[in-house]
Image (tube, rainbow, N blue to C red):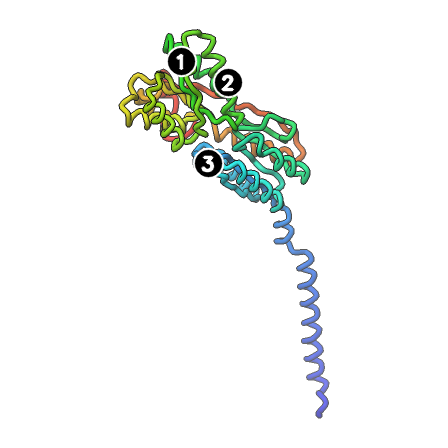
């Protein structure tokens, strides 16, 4: 075996030393991985609304998502599709995925409580949007429309238009927002003894449920001339059934939302009125309050976003091409 000459030894030692040097740098860089630091600083949030089958919740979610992603953070949205058990499971899963906060529109204000309590134990911020639960102590923030007033202004408008009537109510009794709207409507309308509540039907605020319910009432020969739906989606189902049975004329339909389709119906004098909500404002207020929590600023515990009546008298002030 031949010994290496001194020049070759020098070259080899240089190569080995360089390799050790760069390996050391790599280790140091790994310990100070800036991309890792960036990943760790990203906030992750969750959202689960009643159903993504309603454009109202799409607007809320996209408003929240826009702000979250502009801050370099992450929003994970789940759709329970009006299934209270599925929504509870989604909340547990989001918490176990490590979200810091969850935006929630409960399908059922009672069934959701154990999942909410689990989130509170884990230090997850709970923000209710659009609707809430009755125990406000379980919320870090609540952002909703003035739902009681939505029912009131629909009833007040009706009282100005009709001297008497028989009313069908399409509701969603497992949600507080629906209950508040119905309460506001009923309390106001019943101040006039010439109005009667004929029946209250659980449409879950869904067109595909409201429509067959309305058909069933028509087949039974139920006498009514007014329908109050807790949202415009349900009202559209009602009007579709009435149209199929040739009963649109003479039936006053009122809803809540200010959905583009409902405003178009009002403009065509098919629907009487709707109490307009502002989903973008609800979403923006909710996400702003979340970042106030994260950054240690003052937080508004409960925000009620005002509603406005849309009728034939002021329909030109509202766009029929989108939400307000």
Q: Observer-nearest residue: 47 or 201?
A: 201
Q: Position of residue 282 (x, y in %)?
A: 52, 29
Q: How far apart are marks 1 and 3 (CA)?
A: 30 Å
Q: In this view, does 141 lie to the left or right of 9?
A: left
Instruction: Using the image, determine if residue 99 lies above or below residue 290.
Output: below
Residue beneath label 3, please? 58
Q: Where is residue 209 in the image (x, y as percent from the top left)?
A: 40, 31
Residue at the image point whose x is 42% and y is 12% from the top:
196
Q: In this view, does 289 lie to the left or right of 55?
A: right
Residue beneath label 2, please? 183
Of badges 1 and 3, the one in the foreground is: 1
Of badges 2 and 1, the one in the foreground is: 2
Q: Tell me if mark 3 has few (under 14), some (14-19) or many (20+) residues whose alpha carbon lies within 10 angstroms of its own.
A: some
Question: Can you tell which quarter of the image residue 68 is in?
Answer: top right
User: Quadrant where the N terminus lies?
Assistant: bottom right
Q: Distance between the residues labelled 3 and 2?
A: 26 Å
Of badges 3 and 2, the one in the foreground is: 2
Q: Residue 158 carries which label?
A: 1
Dot 2 or dot 1: first in sequence order is 1
Q: Tell me if mark 2 has few (under 14), some (14-19) or many (20+) residues whose alpha carbon lies within 10 angstroms of its own.
A: some
Q: In this view, does 235 lie to the left or right of 285?
A: left
Instruction: Using the image, determine if residue 296 lies above or below residue 302.
Output: below
User: Secondary structure beneath disc 3?
Assistant: helix
């Amino acid at each position: 075996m031949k010994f290496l000459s001194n020049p070759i030894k020098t070259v080899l030692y240089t190569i080995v030393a360089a390799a050790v040097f760069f390996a050391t740098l790599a280790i140091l860089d790994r310990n100070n991985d800036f991309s890792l630091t960036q990943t760790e600083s990203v906030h992750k949030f969750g959202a689960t609304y009643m159903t993504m089958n309603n454009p109202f919740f799409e607007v809320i979610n996209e408003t929240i998502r826009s702000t979250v992603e502009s801050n370099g953070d992450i929003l994970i949205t789940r759709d329970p599709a009006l299934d209270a058990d599925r929504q509870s499971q989604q909340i547990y899963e989001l918490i176990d995925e490590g979200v810091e906060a969850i935006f929630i529109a409960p399908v059922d204000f009672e069934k959701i409580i154990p999942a909410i309590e689990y989130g509170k134990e884990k230090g997850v911020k709970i923000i209710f949007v659009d609707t809430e639960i009755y125990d406000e102590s379980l919320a870090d923030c609540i952002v909703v429309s003035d739902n009681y007033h939505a029912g009131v202004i629909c009833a007040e408008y009706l009282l100005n238009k009709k001297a008497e009537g028989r009313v069908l109510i399409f509701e969603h009794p497992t949600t507080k927002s629906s209950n508040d709207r119905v309460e506001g409507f009923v309390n106001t309308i019943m101040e006039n003894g010439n109005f009667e509540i004929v029946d209250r039907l659980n449409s879950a605020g869904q067109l595909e449920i409201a429509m067959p319910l309305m058909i069933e009432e028509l087949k039974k020969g139920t006498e009514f001339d007014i329908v109050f739906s807790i949202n415009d989606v349900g009202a559209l189902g009602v009007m579709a059934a009435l149209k199929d049975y040739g009963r649109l004329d003479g039936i006053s339909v009122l809803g809540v939302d200010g959905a583009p389709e409902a405003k178009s119906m009002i403009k065509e004098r098919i629907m009487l009125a709707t109490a307009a909500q502002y989903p973008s404002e609800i979403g923006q207020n909710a996400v702003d309050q979340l970042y106030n929590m994260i950054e240690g600023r003052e937080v508004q515990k409960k925000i009620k976003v005002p509603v406005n009546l849309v009728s034939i008298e002021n329909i030109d002030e509202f766009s029929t091409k989108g939400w307000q």
